Image (cartoon, rainbow, N blue to C red):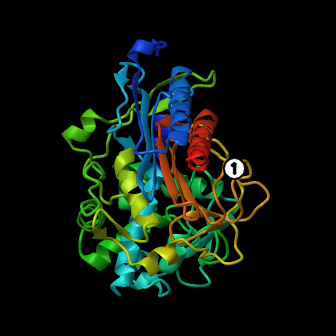
Amino acid sequence: MTLILQTRRHMLKSTAATTAVLSLARFATFGARADAASGSKEVLGSIDQTLRQAAEAKDVPGVVAMAATDNGVLYQGAFGSRNLANGSAMTLDSVFWIASMSKAITSTAAMQLVEQGKLQLDQPIGGLLPELSAPQVLEGFDDKGDPKLRAAKRPITLRHLLTHTAGFTYDFFNADTARYEKYAQLPPLASGKNGALRTPLAFDPGDRWEYGINTDYVGKAVEVASGKRLDAYLHDHILSPLGMVDTGFAPGPDQQARLVSIHGRAPDGSLAPVDFPLVKDPEFYSGGGGLYSTAHDYLAFLQMIMRRGTFNGAQILRPETVAQMSQNQIGDINVPKLWKTIVPQLSNDVDFSVPFPNQDLKWSLSFLINTQPGVVGSSAGSLSWAGLANTYYWLDPTRRVTGVILTQILPGTDPLAGRTYGQFQAGVYKALASG
């Protein structure tokens, strides 16, 4: 399958940043709801039907979705298969590569250290990370094909890194970055080698917003400030206190037995598993995209944010820190609505005008913020983001609801997976209204 081979090849060249029809009897179906008012039970049942149909139609190979309110879990369901080639059943405890959903967890770690005075938002980060002490901006290439570099006009701060305004990019959305990586023969980000992060900036820190490897440097800052490797810090200070026992950078044997295969979407719409080996002994753990998790674990993290820093009896952040992490931190700068892919095998175009039309989008210290209500019901000021392999979450502080939906498909921003996410989200809001 050409798409699968090309996708895996690009994952090894750049960032990770990314068959027969099964009969109904071979699909695992787990639909469960927490205590719900009788008026909402029928609506929650319709979510089961929506997700089951998505799996049966191969809109997704399999899916796990969960949602919670202040009263606890509102919905949970698992449908389809972990691997379409062998028909293994999807279960509620299935383990997914959550990719860029890692960013919010790594950012939380950084904000814990800000609370302790071990990190500062607005001091030059180069004092902590020498590799960022003299950043250079790439201004294209000369006639010989050599990069044109100049010194950045201002230093990079932790705030720049957390808000994606530092100037770093991803190579599958920025052609100059991809060209520089080839010129400098940098190792791929998926290799876990430090050299993969040695890209120049695309613009001066603070000038605009562009998605990129910023959070990988946040993870490095956490390591230096805490004196622990990122995996150990996250385990000790976030994952273990929240009971997120299946979340980490290196799934153990138990998690690997429940690991969902990444599937490639072919041009004809069919899906098939992609070879996606785990990187062993990386030089750095990717705080921006390296975590594996379950829907249950990630929902616990989201509930902690929704409950202003405390969940499962553990205080992870102060309420005022959560408030800061939930507010616009980029001022008049906007998150671009349309991102054009340059590697369609890895990601489709990203078009935020579909879920969030006629509004500006902002970024906090961790999350995307829609400034007006979303199409399917999210309130203005809601927080959301996603992972490359079509994993999604949102948190609505006004309606007091949060949800996560996980599948494993490349390219990213898959239209059918995105539609399934929208249908799930709409069903949750309908259940709230009927309850």
Q: Which residue is mark 1?
A: 355
Query: Where's residue 226, x and y in %?
Result: 27, 76
Q: Residue at x 52, y 61 (%)?
A: 400
147 or 158: which is nearer to us?
A: 158
345 or 258: which is nearer to us?
A: 258
**Residue 291 visible in the displayed image:** no
Q: Residue at x 35, y 54 (%)?
A: 192
Query: Where's residue 267, x and y in %?
Result: 63, 25
Q: Is residue 434 above or below residue 300?
A: above
82 or 160: which is nearer to us?
A: 82
Residue at the limit of the structure toward the front, as seen here:
38
Q: Quadrant of residue 289?
A: bottom left
Q: Quadrant of residue 241?
A: bottom left
Q: Quadrant of residue 421?
A: top right
Label 1 environment density (alpha carbons within 10 Å; few <14, some 14–19, many ≥20): some
Residue at the limit of the structure toward the left, as seen here:
253
Q: Number of callouts in the render?
A: 1
Query: Where's residue 266, x and y in %?
Result: 58, 25
**Residue 44 visible in the displayed image:** yes
Q: Is residue 151 left or right of residue 142?
A: left
Q: Amino acid at mark 1?
A: Pro
Query: Where's residue 174, x and y in %?
Result: 63, 55
Q: Is residue 40 above or below residue 263?
A: below
Disc 1 is placed on an element classified as: loop
